[in-house]
Image (cartoon, grey):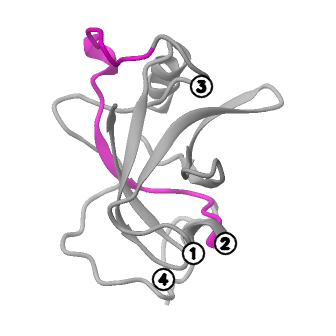
Amino acid sequence: MGSGGGGGGGGGSGEGRKPRRSKQPPARFTDGVIAGSGQGGGGGSSGGVLPEECQISFETDLSGVDPEVLANVEEGDELTVVLHREGRYLSAICRNGAGHIAGSLANVEDLAGLIACLQRNHRYVAHVRDVGERYCTVLVEPR
């Protein structure tokens, strides 16, 4: 029986889901850190000092996942975290190496902070920790 918060498109009924090693709440922060990736080139966090407010890292399940993209994503893959604009709204999404959207980062405690860091061209990567037909768990951290 499905329980809990609808919406997001990434929840589903858990079909095809592998058992998890530990049950953690979405978007656990490590040492006050979150993550993001600057859209486009230049700038970013590589080679420079990352400001404290952008030293972000967390594990979460992607929302609104695309099963066709996930079919080509494996545990251990790296996804790039980038800004995505839909009209006047900004969101943080994860793209695979081919540039396809795997899903979005929505269940993040300080999404506004993440987006602000992305807007400042700080780069982040999402390491795939677990993936199935309708879910993808990632660890997001600065690149």
Pointer 4 with pointer 2, Cβ within 8 A? no
* Amino acid type of the residue that numbered disc 4 sits on in the rendered structure: Gly
Which segment is the magenta one? 44-67
Q: Secondary structure at mark 1?
A: loop
Query: Which secondary structure class fits the magenta region best?
Result: loop
Q: Quadrant of the C terminus?
A: top left
**Magenta stretch containing residue 32, yes or no?**
no
Q: Secondary structure at mark 3?
A: loop
Q: Residue at x 46, y 77 (%)?
A: 132
Against 121, is 143 above or below?
below
Between the C-alphas of marks 2 and 3, the distance is 23 Å
Between the C-alphas of marks 1 and 2, the distance is 5 Å
Q: Which residue is mark 1?
A: 71
Pointer 4 with pointer 1, Cβ within 8 A? no
Q: Which residue is mark 2?
A: 68
* Amino acid type of the residue that numbered disc 1 sits on in the rendered structure: Ala
Q: Which residue is mark 4?
A: 14
